[in-house]
Image (cartoon, rainbow, N blue to C red):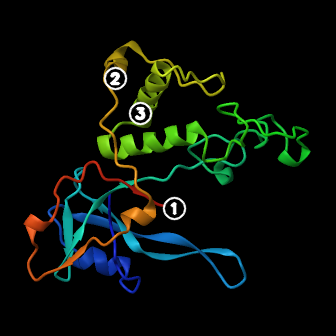
Amino acid sequence: MGVISDIDPSFTEEEIAKFAEANSEIIKVRRLKKRKIDNDNKVIYVDSNSCVLTFRNKIIPPYVTLYHNVLEVVQYVSPVIQCFNCLLYGHTAKLCRGKKRCNNCGDEHEEENCIRETPQCFYCKKDHKATNRVCNEFANQKLIKEMMAVHKYTYYEASLLIKKKNTNNSQVITNDNYNFPQLPKTDIKIINNNLPPTITQQTYAQQTAKHIHTTSTPNLHSINTNKTENSYYVCH
């Protein structure tokens, strides 16, 4: 999947899917949402100027054209999702089947009943809450998403590579409930590979810089066709 920017919200998903052209068939268009504070000081989500395109081929094209405009396509990276019930990654509290964990200490009780004054992270045992994005585990999960999107690893493969990296850096995970499963012998080649080249880590705001070039004919020389190292961070 790839992301295009500077698409006015007046354009519908159906219209974009019908009139956008690329060297790979566009099979789905989804407009991204952005957070906004309304007049009542409440958080709402409104349409942004960016859309996620799903292509028939796994390799995303470098650009698409829409009404004679050439739009750069940037690799889409799924957002990191963390459950506020069990504190694990990969699902939301609405779909959680696990036990309630305290965000302040990681034990199985409600946070309001916690007697610990200083928080202790469930993952790294440092003095912050488990949902705090300063945690190294959040960075690990973010990198896993990048590796899955850019290099087409499975979650399992990417997790093993991250575990190897952390072990080599003497950052061994101490929580027994969180350790990744052991690598089967048939997959031994996976951990013998080095981590992929550094993936560009840009924020949503940085990535939504101008990517539109108005021209009657696509100017192929003006477009950087090497997009495999670009990534896009979004919120739903």
From this view, report whether residue 155 is shown above or below residue 228: above
Left or right for 41, reference 181: right
How many C-alpha atoms fall within 10 Å of the one at disc 3: few (<14), some, or many (≥20)? Answer: many
State the residue lying farthest toward the top: 185
Q: Which residue is mark 3?
A: 158
Q: In terms of sequence position, does the residue under pointer 3 or pointer 1 come before the other?
A: 3
In terms of secondary structure, where does tag 2 sit? Answer: helix
Q: Which residue is mark 1?
A: 235
Looking at the picture, which amino acid does disc 2 mark? Ile
Q: In terms of sequence position, does the residue under pointer 2 or pointer 1 come before the other?
A: 2
| Marks 3 and 1 close (CB-CB < 8 Å) | no
Residue 38 occupies quadrant: bottom right
Looking at the picture, which amino acid does disc 3 mark? Ala
Q: Residue at x 59, y 24 (%)?
A: 173
In terms of secondary structure, where does tag 3 sit? Answer: helix
The residue nearer to you, when weighing 96 against 126, is 126
From this view, report whether residue 218 is shown above or below residue 83: below
What is the CA distance from the residue labelled 2 to the residue labelled 1? Answer: 31 Å
What is the CA distance from the residue labelled 2 to the residue labelled 3? Answer: 9 Å
Image coordinates of residue 201 in percent, x first then y, are 40, 50
**Numbered label attached to residue 190:** 2
